[in-house]
Amino acid sequence: MFIAAVLNALMDRVENENFSSSVFKNLNQKFWYKRESWKHAKKVFGWKFDAWHVAKSLMIISLAFAIVLYRSILGILDVLIIGAIWNGTFNIFYNRIFKKV
């Protein structure tokens, strides 16, 4: 869940107006900036190869692994723990690590 939340934060940082305030803004926009990258992305078996699509695919794979490997620890309280892991990780990466001030 941690990895999936990091990838989701990356996806949100590289799209639209968020890109200009990200640590990715000085990197190649043809790969990193969603508004530009979709125009230039190379296709591999019909799948676009740019930062947003790579992050999205890896996020889905991470979620699938989390489902397959999940073992309950505290029963229904696991939902709260998983939510806290997702929200905490997402916020740290989106608002601190991937944000350039």
Image: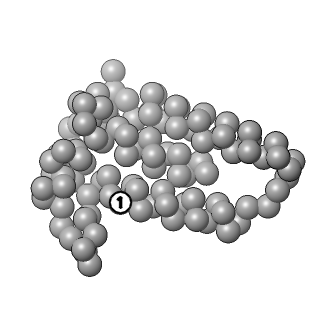
Please rate how many residues cluster around mark 1, counting C-alpha atoms within 10 Å: few if below 14, some from 14 to 19, many from 20. Answer: some
The residue most toward the left is 39
Q: Is residue 6 left or right of residue 75?
A: left
Residue at horizontal 59 percent and vertical 36 percent from the top: 87
Q: State the image coordinates of residue 8 (x, y, percent, origin top left).
A: 45, 46
Q: State the image coordinates of residue 100 (x, y, percent, origin top left).
A: 33, 27
The residue most toward the front is 76
Secondary structure under tag 1 reads helix
In which quadrant of the rendered view does residue 22 lie? top left
Q: State the image coordinates of residue 92 (x, y, percent, origin top left).
A: 52, 32
On-image quarter of the C terminus: top left
Question: Residue under circle 1?
Answer: 54
Q: Is residue 35 left or right of residue 9?
A: left
Q: Is residue 78 left or right of residue 55?
A: right
Residue at horizontal 23 percent and vertical 47 percent from the top: 34
Residue at horizontal 69 percent and vertical 45 percent from the top: 82
**Vertical relation: 5 (above or below) 21:** below
The residue most toward the bottom is 45
Q: How is the image coloured?
A: one colour
**Vertical relation: 41 (above or below) 100:** below
Q: State the image coordinates of residue 68 (x, y, percent, origin top left).
A: 67, 68
Mark 1 residue type: Val
Tally of numbered tags? 1
The residue most toward the right is 74
